[in-house]
Amino acid sequence: MSILDVEKVKKELDSYDADNSGTIDREEFNTFIRNVFGAKDKYDIPARRLEEFWKMLDTDQKGEVTLEEFVGFFW
């Protein structure tokens, strides 16, 4: 992954980081997933599916997703 790709991913991550913590929490992540899949409301994607995605992304199980985890999920 190039530096430009990482910068694009960071920009995407930052756009969902509502509290500017530098990480994505579960609710911010759910918003991201709903937007990616074009969900019309929060019930379009089952909670168990959101949980599965979250577990794949939050690899260290700290309850937040870092840039490294975010990049690792997509590449």
Image: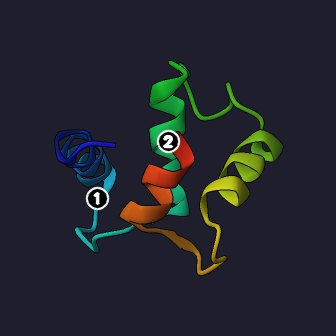
- The residue sitting at the right extreme is 48
- The residue sitting at the bottom extreme is 62
Q: What residue sits 24% from the left and 47% below the top?
A: 15
Question: Toward which corner of the image does residue 22 lie, by quadrant?
Answer: bottom left
On screen, residue 16 above or below 19: above
Residue located beneath label 1 in the image: 18
* Drawn side of residue 9 relative to residue 31, left or right: left
Q: What amino acid is at disc 2? A: Trp
Q: Nearer the viewer, mark 2 or mark 1?
A: 2
Could you tell me which quadrant the N terminus lies in? top left
Give the mark nearer the N terminus: 2 vs 1: 1
**Percent x, y of residue 52:** 77, 49
Q: How many marks?
A: 2
**Percent x, y of residue 63:** 58, 75
Residue located beneath label 2 in the image: 75
* Drawn side of residue 28 relative to residue 16, left or right: right
User: CA separation, marks 2 and 1?
Assistant: 24 Å
Q: What amino acid is at disc 1? A: Ala
Circle 1 crowding by C-alpha within 10 Å: few under 14, some 14–19, many from 20: some
**Percent x, y of residue 12:** 28, 42
Q: What residue sits 72% from the left and 59% below the top?
A: 55
As drawn, the label of residue 51 is none
